[in-house]
């Protein structure tokens, strides 16, 4: 059977019927997406790798719950996001690290500009880490993963209006913290 030509839902059906090779195809299609989402939420590559593997085990065990009216990628991101949130609750952490946005120094003209840009990037990551999950998750999914409001709504199982509101409020909290930093105030939330 040529799994490469099958759509996601047909692969899910094959998996549910016991075809492990079909799940291998799904794994190949979505491993980078899952790893990317998890890594942006935990910022530790080893931890992200472990969590991504756990996500795929969870996906495999729950394939019969997949609803074909949603894209498989959306369902996968939802499972991954919820798994990381549950993991963090179990660890009783207050924040989630945010992956480095990239090496800013490559784009800077001088060493001083590179340092300033890198520090600003670090401060922004710290501020995002300080956001409560209800604001951080939609902001990460929207700005880092490039998902639409509708996709985030489906992933988080929240109404579209609530997703838009949380992204707006999260941005407002970040802006207020940045203004406070410029004034020399503490930027804790």
Image: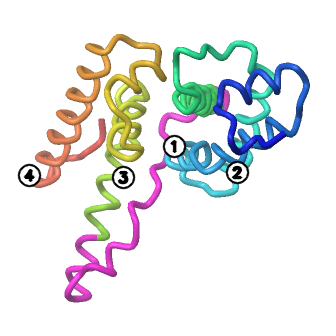
Label 1 – label 3 distance at C-alpha: 11 Å
* Secondary element at image label 1: helix
Q: Nearer the viewer, residue 152 or 91?
A: 152
For the residues bearing labels 3 and 4, Cβ distance under 8 angstroms: no
Is 122 colored magenta in this rendering? no
Residue at 60% in and 55% down: 44
- Residue in view at x 36 percent, y 43 percent: 146
Q: CA distance from mark 3 to mark 2?
A: 21 Å
Q: Quadrant of residue 114?
A: bottom left
User: Given contact means CB atoms under 8 Å apart, are the residues at marks 4 and 1 in contact?
Assistant: no
Please name whichever residue, 116 or 56, is drawn nearer the observer in this view of the structure: 56
Q: Which residue is mark 3?
A: 125
Which mark, by number, is residue 49? 2
Q: Identify the magenta region.
A: 89-117
Q: Is residue 66 above or below residue 48?
A: above
Packing grade of label 4 (10 A; few <14, some 14-19, many >=20) is: few
């Amino acid at each position: 059977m040529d799994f490469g030509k099958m759509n996601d839902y047909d692969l899910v059906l094959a998996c549910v019927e016991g075809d492990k090779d079909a799940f291998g195809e799904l794994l190949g299609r979505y491993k980078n997406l899952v790893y990317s989402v998890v890594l942006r939420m935990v910022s530790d590559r080893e931890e992200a790798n472990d969590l991504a593997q756990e996500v795929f085990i969870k996906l495999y065990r729950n394939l019969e719950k997949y609803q074909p009216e949603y894209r498989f990628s959306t369902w996968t991101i939802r499972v991954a996001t919820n798994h990381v949130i549950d993991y963090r609750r179990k660890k009783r952490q207050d924040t989630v690290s945010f992956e480095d946005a990239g090496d800013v120094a490559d784009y800077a003209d001088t060493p001083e500009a590179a340092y300033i840009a890198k520090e600003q990037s670090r401060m922004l990551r710290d501020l995002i880490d300080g956001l409560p999950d209800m604001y951080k998750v939609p902001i990460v999914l929207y700005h880092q993963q490039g998902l639409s409001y509708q996709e985030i709504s489906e992933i988080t199982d929240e109404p579209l209006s609530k997703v838009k509101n949380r992204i707006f409020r999260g941005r407002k909290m970040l802006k207020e913290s940045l203004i406070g930093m410029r004034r020399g105030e503490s930027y804790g939330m």
